[in-house]
Image: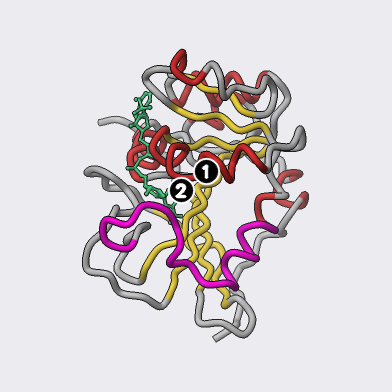
Amino acid sequence: MGAVVRAPPRGNGREEMDVESPGCGRTVGRMEVTLIAAQSLDGFITRHDEPGTAFTSAADKTHFAATLARFDASVMGGETYRVARSVIRSRLTAARRRLVLTRNPGAYAGDAVPGQLEFTSASPLELVRQLASQGHRRCALLGGAQVHRLFLAAGCVDFLELSVEPRIFGSGVPLVGGRLDLHLTLERHERIAQSDTLLLTYRVAPKAPAG
Ligand SMILES: NC(=O)c1ccc[n+]([C@@H]2O[C@H](COP(=O)([O-])OP(=O)(O)OC[C@H]3O[C@@H](n4cnc5c(N)ncnc54)[C@H](OP(=O)(O)O)[C@@H]3O)[C@@H](O)[C@H]2O)c1
């Protein structure tokens, strides 16, 4: 293992590619949305009913921190925020704007830090359009299952970057919280050095024309 196939350039390179993205990206210009998640081999993003990502390997935690530095915006669901609230609030920076999707943004007025941590009930398309129009170019979609489904169903995800941990849980929160049938193209596969964690990058295929 360790071979890399059809590797797109990482970092700025991919951003500079003059291509239109599927779904939301096609409509709003060139902001890319990348779903980033760590999962067990059998597709769960939590271990059983334990909230959070304590199950991920040290190698992936290091990789995830480095990966986030590529993004100027990120979006997560209200539940993911509530689970990781204190860590998120302790690590805010102006370099990456965090948006939390909630049906009740007003309830979080005390947590909001304009430009760094904001709460919204906008739809995926509205959110992506808004971020793109405000100059953001790379948005990380950081879970959880409900929000993954919402964005994937709306055609608002360009890439998936999955860390597959060598674990089998049999139960937990799934990667996607609801029925979908999407086609993906494998862009890259590699192993995190000196670990058994696999990194898979997929591009979401453009939606087939209706009819
Ligand atoms: N392994 C990983 O990589 C990874 C990554 C992320 C999260 N996780 C884990 O996944 C779990 C959370 O996943 P989840 O699926 O339960 O929750 P989630 O997707 O993080 O958040 C769900 C919440 O998002 C908000 N929401 C959903 N649809 C909405 C809509 N249409 N409009 C506005 N707001 C909407 C609601 O927040 P309100 O209730 O505030 O209205 C809802 O309760 C946590 O345990 C977390 O630690 C794992």
The residue at the point 32 percent across, 48 percent down is 176
Q: Estimate the x, y position of residue 99 in percent, counting from the top left.
A: 56, 29
Query: Foreground: 72 or 3?
Result: 72
- Whichever of labels 1 and 2 marks the residue nearer the N terminus, that label is 1
Q: Estimate the x, y position of residue 19 in percent, counting from the top left.
A: 65, 40
State the quadrant of the N terminus: bottom right
Q: Estimate the x, y position of residue 49 in percent, counting from the top left.
A: 26, 56
Q: Secondary structure at mark 1?
A: loop
Question: Dot 2, how many residues are within 10 Å of its Cα: few (below 14), some (14-19), or many (20+)?
Answer: many
Q: Estimate the x, y position of residue 183 in percent, counting from the top left.
A: 36, 52
The label shown at residue 158 is 1
The residue at the point 64 percent across, 33 percent down is 31
The residue at the point 74 percent across, 37 percent down is 93
Ligand 1 is found in which quarter of the picture?
top left
Query: Would residue 197 be found to the left or right of residue 177 on screen?
Result: right
Magenta span of residues: 47-66
The residue at the point 37 percent across, 20 percent down is 103
Q: Is residue 185 magenta?
A: no
The label shown at residue 204 is 2
Mark 2 and mark 1 in contact (Cβ < 8 Å)? Answer: yes
**Residue 154 appears in which quarter of the rendering?**
top left
Q: Is residue 60 magenta?
A: yes
State the quadrant of the C terminus: top left
